[in-house]
Image (cartoon, grey):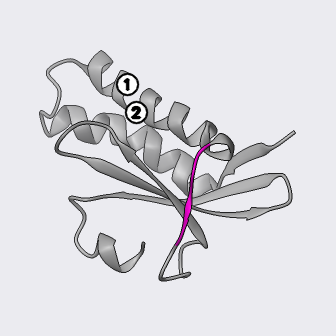
Amino acid sequence: MEKVRLVPELAYQLNDLIDVLFVAEYFSFKQSAIEYVTDIENFIYAIPSLKHKLCKNKKYGTWYCKYKRNHQTTWYIIFDKEDDLYLIKYITNNHTKGYLLLI
């Protein structure tokens, strides 16, 4: 059975993302921000069954998957895989400066 694990820093970043989205007023309600991040997490745990591509820059990981959350934002989940383990090492989106250098 394939397993998905997040590096500890990434787990904290996803948790912090809820507050960032709410405080920056991307969402009017904190529950909406929680649901948004939960959707990202659900996507991450589905990665073993999804199509993935090789990264150009291996600094953060060897593979990536794209998650198009809405028409404005695409998330890039970057990871390494070995046998049945998918280690999620980094997450970025198309609003982050330099994201194209990673994928």
Give x and y (percent) for residue 76: 41, 56
Magenta stretch holds residue 31: no
Closer to the camera in the image, 103 or 36: 103
What is the number of the mark on residue 17? none
Q: Quadrant of residue 95?
A: bottom left
Could you tell whether 58 is left or right of 5 in the image?
A: left
Give x and y (percent) for residue 101: 35, 80
Q: Amino acid at mark 2?
A: Val
The residue under label 1 is 34
Q: Amino acid at mark 1?
A: Ile
Q: CA distance from mark 2 to mark 1?
A: 5 Å
Give SS at disc 2: helix
Name the quarter where the C terminus is drawn. Answer: bottom left
Depicted 59 relative to depicted 29: above or below: below
The residue under label 2 is 37
Numbered marks: total? 2
Magenta stretch holds residue 51: yes
Say which residue appears at 81% left-offset and 43% top-offset: 2
Depicted 11 relative to depicted 21: above or below: below
Instruction: Report if the CB atoms under discs 2 and 1 are less than 8 Å apart.
Output: yes
Could you tell whether 2 is left or right of 24 in the image?
A: right
Give x and y (percent) for residue 46: 61, 37
Q: Residues within 10 Å of mark 1 (few under 14, many from 20)?
A: some
Say which residue appears at 56% left-offset and 57% top-offset: 52
Say which residue appears at 18% left-offset and 40% top-offset: 71
Give x and y (percent) for residue 27: 17, 27
Q: Start and end of the magenta stretch?
A: 50-54
Give SS at disc 1: helix
